Amino acid sequence: MLKPRLWFCLALVCGGVAVLADTLQLKDRSAITGKVLAEKRDAVAVDVGYTVLLVPRSAVESISRSDEPLLPGKASANKKTAAKTNQPEAKSAIESKPGFYRAATKPSPERNVRDLVSQLGEAVVQVRTPSSLGSGFFINDEGFLLTNFHVIEGETQISVEVFLQKAGQLERKTYKQIRIVALNKFDDLALLKIEEVGAAKFKHVVFGSSDALAVGERVFAIGSPLGLERTVTEGILSTKTRQMQGELFLQTTTQINPGNSGGPLFNLGGEVVGVTNMKITFGEGLGFAIPAESVRYFLDHRDAFAYSTDNPSNPYRYLEPPGRTRHVVPSE
């Protein structure tokens, strides 16, 4: 699919032939401007001046029509047309998942890490058990939080330390009434919930898309490496498809150390694009994170991974096999 800037270049090469300013808004956030000649059940025919395109109907988000001529590469002066064309941009950038988590529907504007850490820091927590320590983050204001399965593996005594900003100072608060909601051992994910009576509403994160990331894009992590809470590290995305043990991970130069496990990996829009979970110990700048799409799949299907007290170290509860059916052999 040709991108908008490429359409612009091709239009300049073809000269200043006027076309009508019909606009096809595509689902990949690009657009095609031309004259809609026909709308069929499976495709839309568009005259862009130098050729006629057949655009699959499944790729079209919306069609805006105008009777005003438009020169290629030149914006229409018709305000009504402009309003229609920009209508998708007017929608909220955040898609609400009722009662659970939020996800961005389009990329957020980039900001500097200093401002983002100040805004997002309260959503990142420290997760402690008698035998381990890790990180985590709130996904909604009701106290649901994510961490790694290996941080709480085999444990039921869990505490969560939250860092609240009050009067310009950080206040540490520890919660010990923690419920294990769901576990996925194979994706190394765990969903917990603070159930302490009188707990306040919690700051929480917004999920982004790891698929939308580009290799070389800057990312940063917040966590508790070696117990040093609220540590911020920054790097770039090395690859989006590093296969290890049959799973795909994000590889990053962001420093990941023991204690970072379960913490969020953010893009510069302040969206969670991964959950940090491991590194290669005999190298530097070789950290890995679970992609946001895998995390959201776990959250959307959390009932299938519900924690069972009958089998606390495994996300699945296996049924007993049926007994052997006895066959009566007739006597001769």
Image (cartoon, helix red, strand yellow):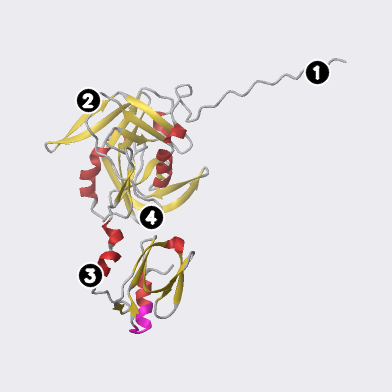
The kind of residue tagged 3 is Lys
Q: Locate the N terminus and report the quarter of the image it occupies.
A: bottom left
Cα separation between marks 3 and 1:
88 Å
Mark 4 or 2, closer to the camera? 2
N-term-proximal mark, 4 vs 2: 2
Residue depth check, mark 4 versus mark 3: number of the one nearer the observer: 3
User: Residue 140 at x, y = what percent?
Assistant: 29, 38
Question: Which residue is identified by label 4?
Answer: 212
Callout 2 touching callout 1 (CB < 8 Å): no
Residue 329, label in figure: 1
Q: Which mark is residue 198?
A: 2
Magenta stretch, residue numbers: 10-17
The vertical placement of 37 against 326, above or below, is below
Amino acid type, callout 1: Val
Q: Secondary structure at mark 1?
A: loop
Q: Secondary structure at mark 2?
A: loop
The amino acid type of the residue labelled 2 equals Gly
Would you name the residue on which mark 3 appears? 79
Kindly report which numbered mark, 2 or 3, lies closer to the viewer in this rendering: 3
Query: Which residue is at the front of the view, 170 or 85?
Result: 85
Would you say residue 184 is visible in this rendering? no
Residue 228: where, in percent of width, then height? 27, 35
- Taking the spot 23% from the left edge, 74% from the top edge, the residue there is 77
Say whether disc 1 or disc 4 marks the residue closer to the N-terminus: 4
| Residues tagged 2 and 3 counted as in contact (Cβ below 8 A) | no
* Mark with earlier residue (2, 1): 2
At x 28%, y 33%, the residue is 142
Give the mark, 4 or 3, whose residue is nearer the N terminus: 3
Q: Is residue 322 visible?
A: yes
